[in-house]
């Protein structure tokens, strides 16, 4: 697999009134070309922080990158000057956020917002502005049609509040794809939607990825969501990547106790007569994280060494990596 994005030993801290929260504790991720990678874990484990770090959208301060690299086509985004990041955000790497109403301005029409995105970085202030806006409007209508918004020539004149939640999310997807980025980051894109609309949005994303060949990082707390779209899955817990493998491998044979717990907490058709088994306990306080493996206070298989020794990552089979001392030699 040829990589387009590599995260190496990324460590991020947040200064808080109560102390320093170590929100990312040395994570490593690789996203390949035309790859679809799901990043899953409980709320508060660091998934969205990882996504925002890629685009340098973290508030600094209180956030602080302690160490690591984020390599996009060999360029370290962490050390890239802010003026150059403008040519990366939206152009090369785009992001679909969780709540569309937060990222769509309620006082402007969909047309105004989509056209402004398309013209961003262009010559909107030159004598060709009127011609450019006409061309951008035509492309905006094409984008709305591509994300399956009915009657795009009419709906483009609507305001965000005149769209349903699913339609607003389609508009955000259209904005994210407007500059044909190489990487699409989708941060919980279906969380605020009902199950039927979730399925439609996931099907749409899958079709667009297959058609345009984007690389996708899909962030979710729902294993069922990432299983529908992603070729590979990375499981995150308390700022650590604990397991990475193909989607088929993860559902066939999960190795890490946390991954097993996530799967056991899902009530599937095959165990409909039984009951879902939640993982006991909660994610630890990242200001005072437990020593050793951060999962050991909740782990049913914890050993004495888990309380003092941080596990390395072990490859148990081709493409299947696990960070757990149960598999240390």
Image (cartoon, rainbow, N blue to C red):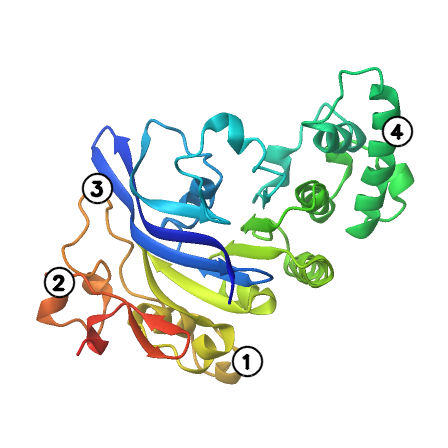
For the C terminus, which image quadrant? Answer: bottom left
Left or right of residue 289, residue 222 in this image: right
Q: Along the polypeptide, which appears first: circle 2 or circle 4?
A: 4
Mark sitting on residue 287:
3
Q: Along the polypeptide, which appears first: circle 3 or circle 2?
A: 3
SS at circle 3:
loop
Q: CA distance from mark 3 to mark 4?
A: 52 Å
Q: Is residue 72 above or below residue 200?
A: above
User: Is the C-beta separation of discs 2 and 1 under 8 Å?
Assistant: no
Q: Where does the image place residue 94, in percent across and percent down from the top left?
A: 60, 43
User: Is the C-beta separation of discs 1 and 4 under 8 Å?
Assistant: no
Q: CA distance from mark 1 to mark 4?
A: 51 Å
In this rendering, the label closer to the viewer, 2 or 4: 4
Among the 4 quarters of the image, the one containing residue 172: top right
Task: Decide which of 323, 170 is in the foreground and name it.
Answer: 323
Q: CA distance from mark 2 to mark 4?
A: 61 Å
Among the 4 quarters of the image, the one containing residue 307: bottom left
SS at circle 1:
helix
Residue 277 in sight here? no
Q: Where does the image place residue 193, in percent across and percent down from the top left?
A: 63, 52
Q: Which residue is mark 1?
A: 269
In this rendering, the label closer to the viewer, 3 or 4: 4
User: Is the C-beta separation of discs 3 and 4 under 8 Å?
Assistant: no
User: Is the C-beta separation of discs 3 and 1 under 8 Å?
Assistant: no
In this rendering, the label closer to the viewer, 3 or 2: 2
Residue at horizontal 55 percent and vertical 80 percent from the top = 269
Tell me the crowding category of disc 2: few under 14, some 14 to 19, or many 20 or more residues within 10 angstroms, Cα based.
Answer: few
Tell me the crowding category of disc 4: few under 14, some 14 to 19, or many 20 or more residues within 10 angstroms, Cα based.
Answer: few
Q: Where does the image place residue 190, in percent across and percent down from the top left?
A: 60, 53
Q: Along the polypeptide, which appears first: circle 1 or circle 4?
A: 4
């Amino acid at each position: 697999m040829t990589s387009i994005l590599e995260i190496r030993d990324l460590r991020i801290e947040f200064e808080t009134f109560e102390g320093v929260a170590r929100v990312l504790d040395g994570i490593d991720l690789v996203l390949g070309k035309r790859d679809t990678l799901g990043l899953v874990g409980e709320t508060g484990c660091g998934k969205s922080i990882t996504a925002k770090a890629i685009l340098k959208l973290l508030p600094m301060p209180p956030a602080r990158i302690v160490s690591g690299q984020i390599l996009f086509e060999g360029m370290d985004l962490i050390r890239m000057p802010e003026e150059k990041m403008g040519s990366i955000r939206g152009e090369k790497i785009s992001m679909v956020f969780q709540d569309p109403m937060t990222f769509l301005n309620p006082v402007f029409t969909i047309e105004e917002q989509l056209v402004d995105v398309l013209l961003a970085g262009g010559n909107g202030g030159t004598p060709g502005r009127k011609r450019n806006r006409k061309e951008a409007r035509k492309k905006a209508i094409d984008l709305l049609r591509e994300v399956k918004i009915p009657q795009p020539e009419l709906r483009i004149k609507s305001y965000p509040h005149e769209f349903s939640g699913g339609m607003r999310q389609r508009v955000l997807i259209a904005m994210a794809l407007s500059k044909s980025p190489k990487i699409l980051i989708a941060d919980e894109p279906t969380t605020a939607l009902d199950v039927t609309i979730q399925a439609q949005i996931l099907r749409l994303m899958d079709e667009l990825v297959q058609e345009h060949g984007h690389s996708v990082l899909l962030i979710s707390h729902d294993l069922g969501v990432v299983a529908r779209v992603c070729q590979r899955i990375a499981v995150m817990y308390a700022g650590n990547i604990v397991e990475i493998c193909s989607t088929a491998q993860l559902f066939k044979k999960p190795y890490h106790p946390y991954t097993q717990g996530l799967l056991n907490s899902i009530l599937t058709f095959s165990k409909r007569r039984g009951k879902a088994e939640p993982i006991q306990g909660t994610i630890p306080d990242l200001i005072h994280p437990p020593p050793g493996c951060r999962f050991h206070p909740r782990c049913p298989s914890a050993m004495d060494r888990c309380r003092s020794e941080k596990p390395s990552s072990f490859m148990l089979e081709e493409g299947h990596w696990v960070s757990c001392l149960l598999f240390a030699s």
